[in-house]
């Protein structure tokens, strides 16, 4: 949005301001005793006062000057705070400056390097300040679970320092026997939280009893759907222990001793705590659009631009967090939440250091563009749209999500459709983009408005499924979807018990087109699972699946209907990898043909295991089932596969079967400065 669009009424907010001033000057005027407001809430109220005499005849803009605004309460906008199409209301960063809305407080006082860490005397271990740990006493602080130093999120002390332990055996759904040396009676055992991974989600458990003699730990019962020892985990549960001072051993880790109100921190190289800004949160949510969907009272034509939102917290119930029952870990509240918003814009903002999800959008016709979301306790974005008009999410950078809730996702399309294009998503605990249609225990409403088209296109997604299994770059379980022109790579699930897929067409995916996607270097390229119907996968490139390239699967009581796999390129070199896994005749595609299938070791199926179709271990036998009669088994001739250029050379045999070139030059954030129209036509 250019500055010419900010003509009209203008207010200013500054950390040097005063809520008793007029707010019409960008800087304090010493002579007149006037200047900018001190808080965004005062600017909101001034606009309310202005609107009380009639609808504005020109746009209204609130410029926030640079600096950090520490909020004491959530900034709430109601339907009365919105604008109109020709007269929007905008809250924007002052040109060239960076305002930060923080839900935290600055940790102030004197850091000490002397003394012992709590529990040192009783444990007999050398947990003294000689380890480099610094401490500071806090004056009646809130109990917080997030900490940042100079804006960078830090990790709560945990054991093990990296990776996971694995249970020895489950004793019950709320207890297990741990392996020798993995656990003990930690200092402040009641404050310890044990994060237990099931498969695609996790529980955060509170210890009720720990028996060192039998190596058994028991937990308070949070009524988890997936209990310890659940067979879907495919082995012992992985877990780690968080918020234990005994784990304070890596630079950048911290521990809050609740009993003594003392914060312990092990500085990273170059950090000077005397000059550093250390912030802990006091709020769970920074901004809320408080519309009313049922009564049709929307917050509309309200724009937020160029603002950083930081430092919110999260809560764990007294008996622990059970698990979401499914995928996505939607834990309320999001740091910035739009309830019943329409025709609003959220552009070029930053959300970081959050307790749960960063952004939640409920409404339609909204534009979410050019934002960066990172270091979130949950996922990046939750969206719900029950109207025919799309929300548009584009050119957003979402990364390093799921710090606390491991199975949170980059973009969670919880209800409805929308357009999600040109986003860059990476380093996420579960999937990059996820869409569901089933109700769960914590997501009670089955996804509605499935007739609205869902478009997922031109996104770049990599390094997802970093913490859990059974995830994908794009994971859908829905209807009426187009997945096209996405670049997905380097998806390897947290433990490889259940693969990480490039594209995962999950339970009852229907009426869906998957085309022109490039997927490479994943555990498996494509998964078609659980009663897919009317699905076409065409003109995609799948390269280098570590296990299988394509997985067609169903439980024993279900089958696919009209799944078509045509004009795709499949290429791999790993001699241990296989082409297809097919779970019986019920999982066979309706059509598989006109593909290019090439394994660099000189064979095609590479000794596949095709469950329920034993003996189908060659291309000739596969063709005897009626598949791939026109498929080519030649090298597709990429321009530079070693250099990651999967463009086809002009002489590629893929063109003989009608394959169309895939252009990834504008995928993700590439080319954002260009004027691009018609991408979604």
Image (cartoon, helix red, strand yellow):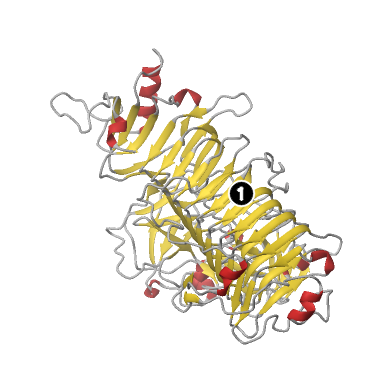
Instruction: Give the tally of numbered discs.
Output: 1
Q: Which residue is mark 1?
A: 330
Q: Is residue 611 visible?
A: yes
Residue 172 point in image, percent of width and height: 78, 66
Which residue: 49% across, 27% down?
Answer: 78
Q: Is residue 105 left or right of residue 461?
A: left
Residue 255 in picture, x, y percent from top left: 47, 62
Q: In front here: 377 or 650?
A: 650
Q: Residue furthest top?
A: 53
The part of the image, by quadrant, that contains residue 250 is bottom left
Q: Is residue 587 left or right of residue 35?
A: right
| Left or right for 540, reference 263 | right
Q: Nearer the viewer, residue 187 or 624?
A: 624
> Within 10 Å of the Cα at label 1, are there few (<14), some (14-19), or many (20+) other Cα atoms?
many
- Quadrant position of the N terminus in the picture: top left
Residue 58, x across and y down, in percent: 34, 22
User: Residue, x 66% and y 85% (percent of image)?
Assistant: 603
User: In the figure, 561 relative to 216: above or below?
Assistant: above
- Is 134 or 70 nearer to us in this picture? 70
Task: Identify the residue at the far left of this view.
Answer: 31
Question: Is residue 202 visible in the rendered structure shown here?
Answer: no
Q: Residue furthest right?
A: 557
Q: Circle 1 — which element? A: loop
Q: Quadrant of residue 237?
A: bottom right
- Compared to 60, does 423 lie above or below? below
Q: Position of residue 383 (x, y in %)?
A: 57, 44
- Residue at x 40%, y 37% (from the top left corner): 304
């Amino acid at each position: 949005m250019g500055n010419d669009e900010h003509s009209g009424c203008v207010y200013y907010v500054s950390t040097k301001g005063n809520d008793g001033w007029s707010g019409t000057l960008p800087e304090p005027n010493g002579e007149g005793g006037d200047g900018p407001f001190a808080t965004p809430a005062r600017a909101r109220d001034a606009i309310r006062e202005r609107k009380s005499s009639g609808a504005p005849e020109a746009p209204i803009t609130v410029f926030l000057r640079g600096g950090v605004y520490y909020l004491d309460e959530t900034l709430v906008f109601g339907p009365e705070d919105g604008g109109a199409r020709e007269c929007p209301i905008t809250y924007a960063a002052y040109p060239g400056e960076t305002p930060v809305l923080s839900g935290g407080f600055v940790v102030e006082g004197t850091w000490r390097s002397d003394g012992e860490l709590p529990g040192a005397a009783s444990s007999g271990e050398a947990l003294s300040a000689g380890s480099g740990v610094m401490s500071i006493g806090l004056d009646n602080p809130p109990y917080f679970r997030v900490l940042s130093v100079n804006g960078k999120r830090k990790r709560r002390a945990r054991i093990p320092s990296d990776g996971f332990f694995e249970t020895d055996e489950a004793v019950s759904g709320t207890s297990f026997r741990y392996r020798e040396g993995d656990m003990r009676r930690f200092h402040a055992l009641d404050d310890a939280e044990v994060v237990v991974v099931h498969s695609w989600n996790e529980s955060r458990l509170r210890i009720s009893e720990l028996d060192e003699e039998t190596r058994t730990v028991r937990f308070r019962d949070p009524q988890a759907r997936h209990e310890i020892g659940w067979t879907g985990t495919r082995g012992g549960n992985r877990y780690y222990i968080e918020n234990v001072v005994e784990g304070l051993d890596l630079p950048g880790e911290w521990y809050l001793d609740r009993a003594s109100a003392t914060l312990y921190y092990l500085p990273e190289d170059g950090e000077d705590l005397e000059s550093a800004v250390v912030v802990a949160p006091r709020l769970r949510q920074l901004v809320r659009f408080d519309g009313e969907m049922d009564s049709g009272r929307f917050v509309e034509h309200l724009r937020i631009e160029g603002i950083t939102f930081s430092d919110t917290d999260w809560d764990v119930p007294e008996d622990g967090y059970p698990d979401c029952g499914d995928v996505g870990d939607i834990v309320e509240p999001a740091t910035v939440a739009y309830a019943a918003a329409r025709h609003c814009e959220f552009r070029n903002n930053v959300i970081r250091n959050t307790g749960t999800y960063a952004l939640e959008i409920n409404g339609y016709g909204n534009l979410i563009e050019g934002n960066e979301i990172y270091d979130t306790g949950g996922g990046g974005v939750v969206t719900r749209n029950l109207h025919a008009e799309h929300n548009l999410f584009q050119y957003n950078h979402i990364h390093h999500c799921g710090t606390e809730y491991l199975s949170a996702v980059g973009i969670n399309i919880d209800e409805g459709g929308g357009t999600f294009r040109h986003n860059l998503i990476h380093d996420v605990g579960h999937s990059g983009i996820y869409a569901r249609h089933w109700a769960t225990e914590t997501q009670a409403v089955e996804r509605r408005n499935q007739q609205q088209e869902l478009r997922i296109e031109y996104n770049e997604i990599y390094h997802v499924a970093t913490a859990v299994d059974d995830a994908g770059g794009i994971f859908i379980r829905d209807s009426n979807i187009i997945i096209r022109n996405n670049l997905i790579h380097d998806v390897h699930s947290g433990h490889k018990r259940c693969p990480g897929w490039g594209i995962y067409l999950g339970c009852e995916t229907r009426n869906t087109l998957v085309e022109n996607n490039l997927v490479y270097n994943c555990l498996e390229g494509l998964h078609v699972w659980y009663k897919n119907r009317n699905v076409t996968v065409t003109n995609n490139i799948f390269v280098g699946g570590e296990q299988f390239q394509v997985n067609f699967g169903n439980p024993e009581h279900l089958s696919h209907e009209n799944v078509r796999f045509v004009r795709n390129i499949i290429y791999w070199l790993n001699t241990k990898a296989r082409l297809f896994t097919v779970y019986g005749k019920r999982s066979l595609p309706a059509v598989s043909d006109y593909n290019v299938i090439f394994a660099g070791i000189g064979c095609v199926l590479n000794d596949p295991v095709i469950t329920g179709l034993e003996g189908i271990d060659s291309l000739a036998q596969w063709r005897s089932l009626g598949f791939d009669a026109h498929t080519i088994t030649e090298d597709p001739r990429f321009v530079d596969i070693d250099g990651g250029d999967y463009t086809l050379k002009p002489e590629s045999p893929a063109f003989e079967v009608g394959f169309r070139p895939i252009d990834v030059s504008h995928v993700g954030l590439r080319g954002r400065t260009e004027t691009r129209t018609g991408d979604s036509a």
